[in-house]
Image: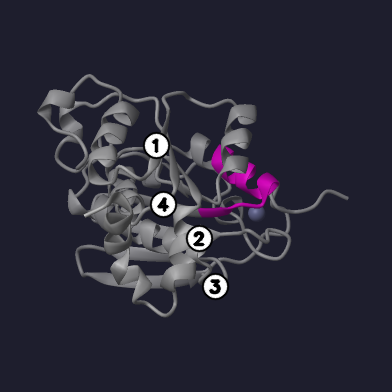
Amino acid sequence: MSETGQKIERAARHHALPQIGTAGQARIESATALLIGLGGIGCAAASYLASSGVGQILLCDFDTVDETNLGRQTLYGPADVGKLKVARAASRLAEMNPDVRLTEIPDRLSDDALAEAVARADVVLDGCDNFATRFQVNDACVNEKRVLVSGAAIRFEGQLAVFGPDYEQSACYRCLYQDADESLDNCSGNGVLAAVPGVIGTMMAVEALKVLSGIPTGSPALNLYDAMTGDWQKVRIKKRESCPACQPVG
Ligand SMILES: [Zn+2]
């Protein structure tokens, strides 16, 4: 089969969805997604962004693969330990779908560099492991008016929220969290059930694909997943009047 034929066959199940169709899939294939963090969440999200043919994926993570990552970070194997996550992830994703353009950003980005990366993207997915970066990514998304799909996972708990792009009317991540909440902070040193980051990363890919194909995502809500009970809870996120990120000055 020709390369064009393979590409059409790969997208056949999207073409068959009236909510996406050939026009929506064309938008997905011409879109750019910025993915912050290539841990358990990022590995799951990246897999579906690549398999579904997102045109370009900017992969941002300065970390290297560690043995303790392998239980849940599914793009890596034992031979990848000590290597840069962005490099190993890009190599694996390119095998999955050679049509996707992959850009490796193996740096801890300055505000300016992050703003530039966010401005290049049609959607931003944040699955990083610390609040400083989450706030930095949020602020760049507010300034550049980009949709932010945010996810976190720890122990048996996961959470997911979609913000923007109309931050004058709707809440941002800093409306939800004012200061670093250590109980939600990274899984290093804490436990996490292997598949929970996978659930959240997969849900983030669902929301990102909706954004890219033009399906409305609704007003911001915090979706909380309790893996112990299997329950999801949805809490609306209200705009905070004193939010330093999304409230216009003056
Ligand atoms: Zn805000």
Give the image location of residue 246, x and y in percent. Answer: 70, 52
Give the image location of residue 126, x and y in percent. Answer: 45, 46
Which residue extends farthest right?
250
Q: How far apart are marks 1 and 2 (CA)?
A: 17 Å
Task: Sort mark 4 into few (<14), some (14-19) or many (20+) by Cα contacts within 10 Å.
Answer: many
Residue 17 among magenta residues? no
Q: Name the residue under label 1.
A: 102
Tell me where the magenta segment starts and ends, as one range.
136-148
Q: Label 1 is placed on what type of residue?
A: Leu
Q: Is residue 12 left or right of residue 116?
A: left
Q: Label 3 is placed on what type of residue?
A: Gly
- Name the quadrant where ligand 1 sits: bottom right
Pointer 2 or 4: first along the chain: 2
- Quarter of the image with the N terminus is bottom left
Q: Mark 4 points at which residue?
A: 54
Q: Which mark is residue 218?
A: 3
Nearer the observer, 150 or 87:
87
Q: Is mark 3 within 8 Å of ligand 1?
A: no
Q: How far apart are marks 4 and 1 (CA)?
A: 10 Å
Q: Which residue is drawn at 45% across and 44% down?
A: 56
Specify the principal SS of the magenta part. helix
**Residues at circles 1 and 2 in contact by the CB criterion of under 8 Å:** no
Q: How far apart are marks 2 and 4 (CA)?
A: 9 Å
Q: Quadrant of residue 112?
A: top right
Give the image location of residue 22, x and y in percent. Answer: 43, 69
Nearest-to-viewer mark from 4 and 3: 4
